Amino acid sequence: MKNSLAERILDFLKTYPPFDSVSYSDLYKLAVETKVIYVDKDETLYSQGKPAKEHFYIVNQGAIRIYRQEGENTVEIEICDEGDVLGLRPLIVNENYNVTAKAYEESIVYGIPIKTFNQQFENNAEINKYLITRFASNSPARFSQEDNNTIFADYKRTTQTDYFSSKIENLTTPAAWCSYKDTVQHAALKMSDEKISSIFILQKEHPIGVITNKQLMHTIATGKHDIKENVTRIMIAPVITASPDVSIAEAQIIMLKNKVEHLCITQDGTPESKMLGMLTQQEIVASLSNNPAVLMKQISRARSISRLRDIRQQLNQLLRRYIDQKISFTHTSTVVAELNESINQKAVELSLSDFTKVPPVNFALFSMGSQARKEQLVPTDQDNGIIFENVADEKLEETRSIFIELANIITKNLHTIGYEYCPAEMMASNPTWCLSRKEWQEKFKNWIHNPTEKSILLSSVFFDFNFVYGQKYLIDEMSNMVYSHTPNNSRFFMFMAQDALKNPSPIGFFRQFLVDQDGAHKDQFNIKQRAMMPLIDAARILTLHHNLIGINNTAERYYKLRELEPQNAEVYEACAYAFKALLKFKTKNGLATLGEDDGKFIKLETLSKSDKVKLRRCFKPIKSIQELLTVRFQGII
């Protein structure tokens, strides 16, 4: 006689990897011994530092928050929802939990006994492959035959690297160094003798700079500096450092952000403490089999726009693989955003090499909107502008025409790579958005001090801007100027609040999704306009209201607001979670419809019942944050 509960569990498990590759009979045996666990909101499933239990878990309903305690700080890693596997690694490598799992909301999880799992699937190649790809986020295509013997080794090996939680200490190597008093010749001889490509410069055991082969080539081989000069004359400073406690994933992000191929490891992670060793990209690549650093290197070596287009397509493949392998979406979005930004920077660099004129003054290209917020995972349309140094009035239009000519090359090249032209022409090639420093300051001052409904609608995207290429001080100065004019500006916040409240709940009176009523996307749900933008707009106005400079990402804004307003922490945390979940929905849809749109239009008939439930769960924080805005700004709306 069949067990009806086991059959329901089986029907659920078979829709998610790695169980989708298991035979019915084997999966039924596992389902019979699987526990159904009800977890109340804020109830702990397992705790950091505690011994591993006999089960690992897969979320059936609800959401489980995963976080790590680092001293007094709580670091959120991910929120797992339906189909996500958790608590498996400690059972495989026989160690205590290194994170805590707590119910974000009332949830149901299935507890799968590791003993039964091992007995049934110890020799199942497909299961073993999946488990390793879950541990090593940068493994190649999921079932790559050529790598079976190296990457998909026996998953029970305790030496297998856990990309997200393993510390870098096992990959750290001794670092060559010399004194800040030494000459360049001394440093170069040491590099030659030890056959190394870089050497750190120390002062009282603290790293103050680094010299690389490339730096020697550009400074000594060119004759710009003499080999007898002091090392401090040519060293690269400051040194990019990390502590031995960071994970491999965190170290990789630091390298990507700073575009370096090695990290100096110090006692407390700062240049002010003793150097312990170094970590190189090569070590990470060797330990993980494949790495976004490979794409980063390809970007830096690209010599044509067509090559960048190919790399952008590779990035889509990397994104799809990360999502298929259920890699942490927070980590996925961070990696893709950094690579995306590098592609844009390289596109500008190549555009300048094709430009027949020399920019007459310092300038900077900046991004706006989703790219500036580092939320553009699937390529969408361009939003960018140029700011250039002030010139005499009689030279202003001539200078602008030169930068517009350059901007036309840049936007054309970005279009070739895969970034569509902005339908509203919010691009640097439009004279309206190619302005001098003085003109940009006047424009922002006017938007802030003389707001109108039209100007706020037009300019809101400009309050999320981020440096791409050129002289960064121009962008920093503009950002500081914007935030210096917003405090106590009630009229400005009135219009911002009205704009942030213009989109009501995405659910209609009868709890149906509000869809487009006509046009090319009739009966489709616009997840960006109806669900994501209310959260983006609310985070923006609250960030401006708190005068928080330098935080553009929507989820990060909510996490910072959570710290500043503990009385509203639950609302802000819910908004951060909802936004990341919505961005993941949009990204997955964008990958599925690549070439049609960026994923913002969803055909509801393609969603499963559980997906619709997940979406509806994300809408509740929209109502909460809009109620908070109404109360916060009710005196001026």
Image (cartoon, helix red, strand yellow):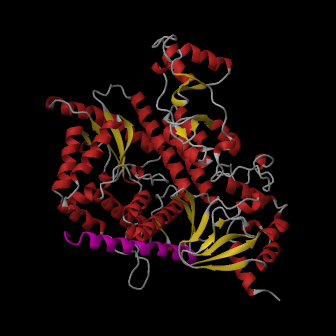
Quick check: is 461 in the magenta stretch? no
Residue 489 visible here:
yes
Q: Residue at x 63, y 44 (%)?
A: 291
**Quarter of image, res 519:** bottom left
Magenta span: helix, strand or loop, mainly? helix
Q: Residue at x 54, y 32 (%)?
A: 301
Residue 508 x, y percent position in the rendering: 39, 81
Residue 350 x, y percent position in the rendering: 44, 32
* Count of numbered marks: 0
Residue range in magenta is 609-637
Quick check: is 613 in the magenta stretch? yes
Residue 567 x, y percent position in the rendering: 38, 70
Q: Is residue 390 rendered to the left or right of residue 11? A: left
Asked whether 83 or 454 is in front, the reply is 83
Asked whether 338 or 235 is in front, the reply is 235
The residue furthest bottom is 1
Residue 522 visible here:
no
Q: Is residue 242 rendered to the left or right of residue 547? A: right
The residue furthest front is 204
Residue 468 x, y percent position in the rendering: 40, 41
Instruction: For the C terminus, give its image quadrant.
Output: bottom left
> Where 335 sits versus 110, above or below?
above
Q: Residue at x 60, y 50 (%)?
A: 318
Instruction: For the N terminus, give its image quadrant.
Output: bottom right
**Quarter of image, res 60:** bottom right
> Where 4 sits versus 211, above or below?
below
Asked whether 127 or 161 is in front, the reply is 161
